[in-house]
Image: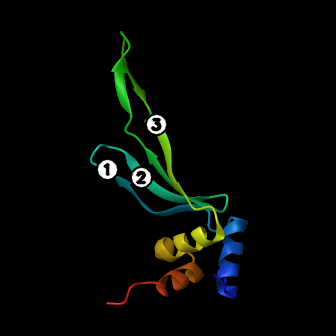
Amino acid sequence: MAITNEEKSLLKKLASGVLDGFVGDDLTTTGGSTVWKAIKNGEPVMFKQGPGGKFFNGKENERFEGVMHTLQEWVTDEQKLEFLRKFGWLMKDEAVKAYSAMFKPKK
C-alpha cells in the first residue's frame, strides 16, 4: 500500500516523540485489572496491569502491585497508521484527529 505525504508526516511526528503519552482513558475490567493504550518512544502499545493485593506478614498488611503485561504493540508503519486511524480521535493533536476522522464509519 502506498503511503501518502500526510501519512509520512504523521509517522515522522510519531517517531519524533511529539505524540508520546496516554491515548484515551484507562479501563478497569471486572476482575480489577487496568487496561490502557499509550505511545512510548514513538511506538503505540496496549498495556494491562493485574489487580494488586495485600497479605498479612505477621505484623501488618503489606500491599503489592499487580503484574504488568504488554497486550499489543503496533510496530510496522502500516500498523502504526492503523492505530492512528482507529484511536487518533482520542489524541490531542489536531492533524491526527483529522486523519482519524477520514476513516470514521459513515452512518
Categorize mark 1 by other alpha carbons within 10 Å: few (<14), some (14-19), many (20+).
Answer: few
Identity of the residue drawn at 35% across and 26% down: 54
Along the line of sight, the residue nearer the viewer: 7 or 3: 3
20 horizontally vs 98: left or right: right
Residue 94 image-quadrant placement: bottom right
100 lies above or below 77:
below
| Residue 86, numbered circle | none
Q: Which residue corresponds to mark 1?
A: 29
**In contact (CB < 8 Å): disc 2 and disc 1:** yes
- Gap between marks 2 and 1 measured at Cα: 8 Å
User: Which amino acid is tagged 2?
Assistant: Val
Q: Which numbered tag is attached to residue 67?
A: 3
**How far across and down, in percent of the image, does residue 61 sit?**
35, 20
Image coordinates of residue 33 in percent, x first then y, are 36, 45
In x, y percent, where is residue 42? Answer: 66, 62
Question: Residue extending furthest front?
Answer: 1
**Is residue 18 visible in the rendered structure shown here?**
no
Q: Which residue is mark 2?
A: 35
**For numbered disc 2, what is the local secondary structure?**
strand
Crowdedness near tag 3: few (<14), some (14–19) or many (≥20) residues, C-alpha within 10 Å: few
Quadrant where the image shows the N terminus: bottom right
Tell me whether the residue at label 3 lies in contact with that at label 1, contact meaning CB atoms closer than 8 angstroms: no
Picture residue at 40% right of the left edge, 40% below the top:
50
